[in-house]
Image: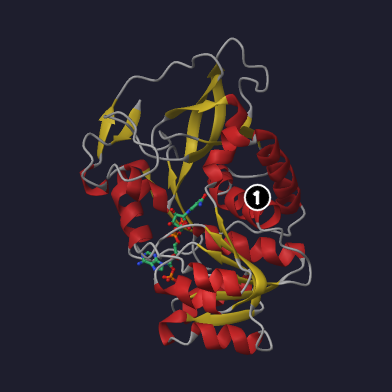
Amino acid sequence: MKAALCTSFDGYQSLDLADVAVPEPGAGQVLIRVQASALNFADSLIVKGKYQVKPPLPFSPGLECAGVVEAMGADVESCKVGQRVMAVLDWGGFAEYALATASDVYPIADNLDFTTAAAIPVAYGTSHHGLIVKAGLKAGETLVVHGAAGGVGLTAVEIGKRVGATVIATAGGPEKLAICKEHGADHLIDYREGGVREKIKELTGGLGAHVAYDPVGGDLFTETLRSTRQDGRILVVGFASGHIPQIPANIIMVKNITCIGYHWGAYRSLDPDALRASFAQLMGWIEDGSLKPHVSLTFNLDQVKEAYEALLSRKSTGKVVVKIRP
Ligand SMILES: NC(=O)c1ccc[n+]([C@@H]2O[C@H](COP(=O)([O-])OP(=O)(O)OC[C@H]3O[C@@H](n4cnc5c(N)ncnc54)[C@H](OP(=O)(O)O)[C@@H]3O)[C@@H](O)[C@H]2O)c1
């Protein structure tokens, strides 16, 4: 099979298309004939050996995919050969076949195309479980979403609205903010213009937001801390800015703020039932049109480096998807 192969931890530029053997599903595993795989920021870290998981070389990156079940381990009863599915992967999505753990494979509706389905698991999974279960977001609360036009950010905007929160979206530039508005954001802040803290305070009657969703980190995190209200919650999702902020304990003490460390992938083993419940609700919301998965750019497997470049140069909004087969 064709696969985008990482043979050294030198970053995405050294990925090469190669012919490798189709993997065999072992106990508890499902082999998926991949149609499309979505790119995540984490894919840029895993090929540098800087992600939580460091696969043995050589490997294919790609943390989520959609396709058709080709085969499975003898003990797997939750899937059928020929079933249309989406899946969360340890890695391996940028290849014609990928192995998934059976509990990470979710059936998809017949009318959901593979490109859209590939874009769902990580971003929607992270924002749904993160906002609803971890941060306890409720109707009537104000939610700030940073990096709101990005992969996880845009899903947080939509889920915040679906839950009944007022959503303040922050992003870099008017085009990105326009996408946030299309996906339901009530208020828009261009963080390139500065004054994020003051603008959030202004929009919340001086009180600050109840919940903040932060996949960007860096200086924006400090603004977040200053613009979260008494007894508010901050979901620490990621550091797309490349800067990991330090949390001043005095401020979170005085303001009774809860900073919630959040790594969604860990819940695949910590609480798979919670993720299954989360996806059941998400797929219902996608089917009834409350959520509209947004794929801004697609590439073919032999263009995987271009896909990375588009994501990392901040040209994409929502998700970037690599079509593995025509
Ligand atoms: N905790 C979890 O379980 C979990 C799950 C998924 C993702 N994440 C993390 O969340 C973050 C975002 O992931 P993603 O897949 O949504 O990425 P993405 O699609 O690239 O979105 C990241 C957004 O961050 C903003 N950004 C601000 N400064 C940036 C910089 N210096 N470089 C690049 N982007 C910058 C960009 O928006 P503007 O151009 O508008 O600023 C971009 O839209 C990553 O750190 C990722 O590892 C965490």
Q: Residue at x 58, y 51 (%)?
A: 126
Q: Quadrant of the C terminus?
A: top left
| Residue 325, quarter of picture | top left
Kind of residue at badge 1 = His
Q: Residue at x 41, y 60 (%)?
A: 239
Q: Nearer the viewer, residue 92 or 67?
A: 92
Residue 60 appears at what percent x and percent y?
Answer: 34, 34
Residue 258 appears at what percent x and percent y?
Answer: 61, 63
Q: Residue at x 65, y 59 (%)?
A: 292
Q: Nearer the viewer, residue 63 or 255?
A: 255
Residue 233 can be seen in this image: yes
Quick check: which quadrant has ligand 1?
Answer: bottom left
Residue 153 appears at what percent x and percent y?
Answer: 54, 63
Q: Residue at x 69, y 51 (%)?
A: 133
- Left or right of 108 in this view: 242: left
Above or below, 270 relative to 177: above
- Disc 1 crowd rating (10 Å Cα; few below 14, some 14-19, many 20+) is many
Residue 102 appears at what percent x and percent y?
Answer: 59, 25
Q: Secondary structure at mark 1?
A: helix
Q: Which residue is mark 1?
A: 129
- Left or right of 200 in this view: 18: left
